[in-house]
Structure formats: structure tokens, C-alpha cells
Image (tube, rainbow, N blue to C red):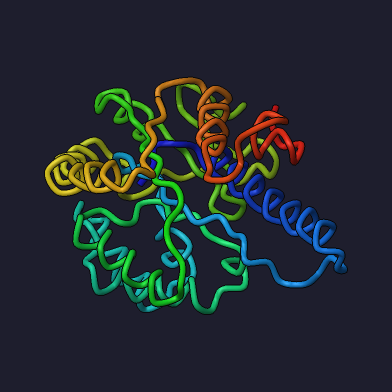
Amino acid sequence: MAPITEEVAQSLLETVQRLEARLQQVEAKLEGRDFGSSSSESMRMILMGPPGADMLRAQVAKKTSLGREAKKIMDAGGLVNDEIMVNMIRSEIESNPDCKNGFILDGFPRTVTQAEKLDNMLSSHQQKLQHAIELQIDDQLLVSRITGRLIHPASGRSYHKIFSPPKQSMTDDLTGEPLIQRSDDNEETLKKRLGTYHEQTSPVVAYYQRTGIWKPVDASQEPGQVWQSLLKCFEGRSGSSGAGGGLLGKLGLKN
């Protein structure tokens, strides 16, 4: 799970979606066809990093059977097992319309076995992963960030006790409704999860380094700088370099 705020993750997702839409438009013009036809281009990437905000939150919020089972494990400080994760990811990729033109996996895979299963699953769909971005941050800094996080349940808006406090203590600025702290956002649980992460998940970095799609990003920077670093990771995408400053520059997405 990646140590970035929900705002940064959402901004990244929106940029990927805009990128895919513009890719389709460019290809339609080059091929002389109307825009709206399907495109074979897509963005498939993962975010790696210590526990923070993970891809299971939506399933937990929906209270699906997989989400309820996952919540019990996360609340105890453990990592959700392969069977639950593989079933969840496969279902999303195959049936979720939002995954039609690609996806971002935040917090999966956590082990080399999971990475291999993901590659096999994508291969069965004649696809492959394109980016594996590792968000790097010091453990103690991450603990201070996560344990101070406050959430408005209805909207998902996030605050921080120190870095971005609400105007009134434990109260949402817009609605006046109470804020909460997630049950697993405590120092004891987080340190336990960090230990599990370093022991079991770090080898995934070496796996993707060998495949050539791994790139590191310093997540201890300010959110805006983290965002710029993330954008730079896409500049090396196969077939996108050359005159015009790379893929993002050509499509008007480079800030």
C-alpha cells in the first residue's frame, strides 16, 4: 500500500484516464476513423510502498463478503491472503468498466508469488504490466503521517492532526460532521504491518527490477513534488520518447 494521500492517488488516476482518452483520439486521427472505436492501448501499473492507504478500502466500504473478511485481517495488523486478493483483482479487471482502458493496483502484489500470479493472469488476457512504481519513505516518518490522519467517512475527505488539521477539532470543514480515525491507523498496528512489509514485500521490488519496469519515487516530499515525480515515471514508456518531449508532453499532460 502506498504512503500517499487520497488526493494524490485520485489525481494520478484522473491523469491516467485523460491520457487514455487522448491516446484514443490521437490514434483515431492517425487511422482516419471516428473516435469512439476501441483502442488496444492501455495503462497498467502498480504502486508499491509501506502500508498506508490501500486498494481494499472500497471493498471494505461496500461491506462485500471479501471486504468484511479483509477488514478483520487488516484490523489485526495482518496482510490479506492470496486467495482473497487474486479473486478480488481478477473480478475487478474482468468486470469493472473503469478497468476497460487499464488500471492502477495500489498495494498488490505484496509477494513474488502474487507478482507471478498477476503476470500469469494478465498474460491470459494477452496483456502485461507496464509500470511498477515504488513509493519510498522512512518508517518513522510514515508512522507520524498515518497516525495523525483523520477521515470524513461520507465524503472520504482527509485531514491530518499536524500537517492539515480541520478548522475545528475532529470536525469536517464543509459539513460540520465528526471526523474519525481508522481502526488500523494506530502506531502498534502500523509498526507490525511495516515489519511484515519489509520481510515479505521488499523482494517484489527486486522482481520488478529484473523485468525492467521498476521506478522509485521519494514519497517523503511534499504531495505536489511526489505528483511531479510520478508523472516523470511515464516519460520512459516504450515508444513514447523522441521529438516533442515524450508522451505526456505531446498529449498536453505535462505540467
From the viewer's perspective, is residue 178 above or below residue 145?
A: below
Q: Which quadrant of the view contains residue 41?
A: bottom right
Q: Position of residue 251 (x, y in %)?
A: 75, 41
Relative vertical location of residue 6 with respect to residue 168 in this rendering, above or below: below
Q: Percent from the top left, x then y, of residue 203?
A: 18, 45
Residue 201 as seen in the image, left or right of residue 253: left
Q: Quadrant of the C terminus?
A: top right
- Judge whether 115 appears above or below 66 on screen: above
| Residue pictured at 16% horizontal, 43% vertical | 192
Q: Nearer the viewer, residue 76 or 238?
A: 238
Coordinates of residue 71 in the picture (x, y in percent): 31, 63
Quadrant of the rendered structure where residue 87 is? bottom left
**For the point 43% across and 58% down, which residue is it?**
57
- Looking at the image, which residue is at 32% across and 27% down? 137
Q: Is residue 33 left or right of residue 73?
A: right
Residue 255 in view (yes/no): yes
Where residue 76 sits, quadrant-wise, is bottom left
Residue 194: image location, x then y, percent: 20, 40
213 or 151: which is nearer to us?
213
**Label tally:** 0
| Lateral position of residue 26 relative to residue 7, left or right | right
Q: Residue furthest left?
A: 199
Name the residue: 81% across, 69% down. Answer: 36
